Structures are given as C-alpha cells and as structure tokens.
Amino acid sequence: MGHCGFITTLKNVREHPNADKLVLATCFESTVCVAKDKYYEGQIGVYFETDLQLSMEFCEKNGLLAVYENGVNVSGGYMDPAKRNVRAIKLRGEQSDGLFLPLDCLAYTGAKLEEFKVGEQITTVNGHEICRKFIPNTNAPKTAAGGAGKRVKRRAKRSIAPQFFEHKDTEQLQYYLDQFKPGDQIEITRKLHGTSGRTAYVKTFRGMKRTFWDWLLRRDGTPIYDWGTVSGTRRTVMDTFEGGFYGSNEFRKQYHDFFEGKLWKGETVYYEIVGFTHDGKSIMGQCSNDKVKDKDFVKQYGKTTTFSYGCVPNPKQVAGVADPADPNSTFQNVERQSRMFVYRMTMTNEDGEVVEYTPEFTRHRCMYMGVDFVPVEWSGIIPQNPGSYEDPTITAGEWVMKKVEQFYDGPEPLDPTHIREGCVVRIINRPTFTAYKHKNFFFKVLEGIIKDTADAPDMEEADGLDDEAETV
C-alpha cells in the first residue's frame, strides 16, 4: 500500500470557521478542505495522500490544472501543470492534508463506477494512469560526479552482497490501524528526517575463479565470496563513496568505517544519517517558513527551517589528539557535522534466513558498539480493552493512533529550532519487521515546499533512479 489513491468515504463533514464556500472533512484520520456545495457526509470518492503526483491526463480531464494569462488564473484549476503534486497546505487558516475528489473523477477512464469498492487502491484504471509517487526534478539526472547530465546505467554481473537486504518500506499508520490487536507489544520511536544507510558484515563478492576450461570456453567461472563489510543507501549497494545525488557520498564513509570490525558475522544495521554532508550541505534541504503561511509557526521556529538535529555545517576544531590510535591526528571536532541513529538490526545466516533483532537487543548492540539508537517515546502493551469509558467502541488501532499523537508533533527535542518529523510505531511481537509511520502536518507542509524548490531529488527519493544501483 502507499503511493496510490484510495476509494473511501467522506466523514465528519463540518463547517470551515473561516470560509463560507468550504467545509472540512476527514479521510483516514486526515483533514481535507472541500467545496461546500459539492461534497457531503458519506460521499464515496478518491482520496489522494500528500506526496502523490497526479497524471497529466487525469488533471486535464478533471479541470485541475492552473492556466495563467497575464498573471491571472483563468482556468479555476489549482495544480501546477509541471508538478501536479498533492501537498499539505493551509486553506484560510485550516489544515488540508491530501485531496478528495468525487468518484466520477474516474468516469473518463470508461470504468464502471458502481464496481469500485471502499478500501480499494488505485494507481491505474482501465489502462489510464491516475497517480504515482512524486519525485521532483526527475528530468535532471545526475552524472557520477553529482551534476546534471546524461544518465549512465551500470550493470554489475554479480551481486556485490547477495545477503545484504534492503530495509522494508514503512507504510502510513493511518491505513493500517486494523493490524493492531489487543495485547500487542508496541514501541513508539521518533522519526528523524535524514537519509537512510545500512551496513552489514556478510559474504561479499571478491572476484571470479576461472579454470583453464573456463578460459578456453570463455565462461565467467565461479564467483568467490568472503566475509566483508559492505554499506549502501536504502536501495543501492555502494562500491565507492564518490558520486551520487549529493555530489559525493563521502559523508557516509565515516559510518561505514565506524562499523568496520564491530559487526558480528551476518549482522546488518539500518540507520538514519541527519545533519550535513562533509562539505556543509544540508542533507535534507532548507525551507523558508514564511511559505508555511502560519504566523505562529514562524514566531516559534524562525524564518528558515534546517533539519540540523543539533549538527552544524562547519564544526569547530580544537587542538588535541582526535584519534588515540593515531598520535599524528592533532585536531578534533567539538561539534558534529552529522549524526547517525540506528533503528533496526538483523542477523542473516549463510542460507539467507533473516532473524529480526528486538528493539531491546538492538539497543544492547548499539550500546556495545557505542552508537545512538533512535529516541524512544513510549513502549508498552495495547490494553485488552482499549476502549475507555469515554469511548468504549475504540479499536486497538485507534488506541495506538491516540497514543502516537501524544508524541508526533512539536519541536524536535534534539534541536528545538525545527519541528519533529513524526513517529514510527513498531509491533514487536511479529516474526518480521512490522512498523508504521505517522508524520505531523507541518512537517508535510515543509517537505512539500522543499521538494517543490529542490534542484534535484534527494537521495531518499532518488534511490531507485541512482546510477550507483547494483543489479543482481
């Protein structure tokens, strides 16, 4: 699930306090603003979540595109024709998180509207693309040096590390409330806005062993694998720290080197890197808070948001021995340029079977290695009877949502100059990694603005497009 439209019903339709022609309504725990004369309680339609891009055809057929003549919008549409992305915004002082359209917005596809079922997910209908994940500036691919230019697709003959597995995507909590059961053990951690990394000590490709007959018959031979440390982004395996969408992945190398010699055979550690790159560039971009259009937000967080997490672009250095093992290292940083936080660890045997570490054991390993674990907000058991005397009908999932919303908003404790991204809630008593994310509204607004003004997609968004990608 995710990166799709959802067939759903409009709930809790209510007056907009500051607009006569708009009403507020609820879709999947999110508030949307809709036209008062076209929408009503229980109406079936399509909900598009924040961070989706609608297809050009869909926008044209439904009159969603803004058309300007002499600086005036003459079409009545509101979608940027180049981006067509759904964003979290404030409309007349109220939050609008996503887009809801009546079911007849799909009529042009020729589909039978009466056959759509509530809960159905759509990206394509009758061969017509409806929506996809929004990745800005994908028309400006990067060269190996990190600049715009012709994309070069490299294909490796062999997997660098066959047992170096990607982290599972974390889906949105609001769509999975039915996955929580009374008695489940859960842990709520803070979500940090950075770029993903992973490092493992697994069998890695060392070369090919070729016999005389291999040479004679022009065969590749037999691949040779041996234990070694390997690192990557969310989607890619790196055999070099040069290039990439940051111009260089040199800032990742220090964390690869940190884990060298510390991981047990078969261990993979998944982490988030926050702050700044080695050349002082913000990992996740910056945003003018004036664009949020909320005076109280600007008053609290200032004119600009930089997701720094207490890090600085250019750390101060003082004289001293930075590395006890190297007496010649005469300077050490007194400030951090970036930070790493572990959120998951696994053990993979030589047959490729994965054992998930519990959060408690992961924290034990982190403490042993001297690395930070993502901040924990709450840990406990979902009550057998999650409903309270105020609302005895509440489900386990709704109870979890209320618990998460105690922690997902407000200033980031690691650096109160910017807002939190949100929370991740993990169900511990599952055999595989099971976790869901919940982002706060103002973070979504900032994220949308940053993507709209980005020169290139960030590493997290571009990971599947990167020309570093390893092919098995």
Image (cartoon, rainbow, N blue to C red):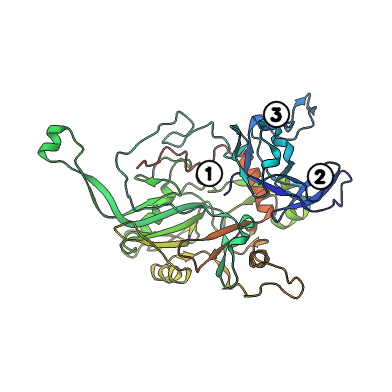
* Crowd band around label 2 with a 10 angstrom C-alpha radius: few (<14), some (14–19), many (20+): many
Q: Which residue is drawn at 81% across and 44% down?
A: 39
Q: Check disc 3 and give the amino acid type.
A: Glu
| Left or right of 275 in this view: 292 | right
The residue mark sitting in front, 3 or 1, is: 3
* Crowd band around label 3 with a 10 angstrom C-alpha radius: few (<14), some (14–19), many (20+): few
Nearer-the-camera pick, 80 or 192: 80
Q: Which mark is residue 39?
A: 2
Tag 1, which secondary structure? helix
**Furthest-left residue in view?**
212
Marks 1/2: CA–CA distance:
34 Å
| Left or right of 62 in this view: 463 | left
Marks 3/1: CA–CA distance:
26 Å
Nearer-the-camera pick, 395 or 260: 395
Q: Residue 461 carries which label?
A: 1
Quarter of the picture containing the C terminus is: top left
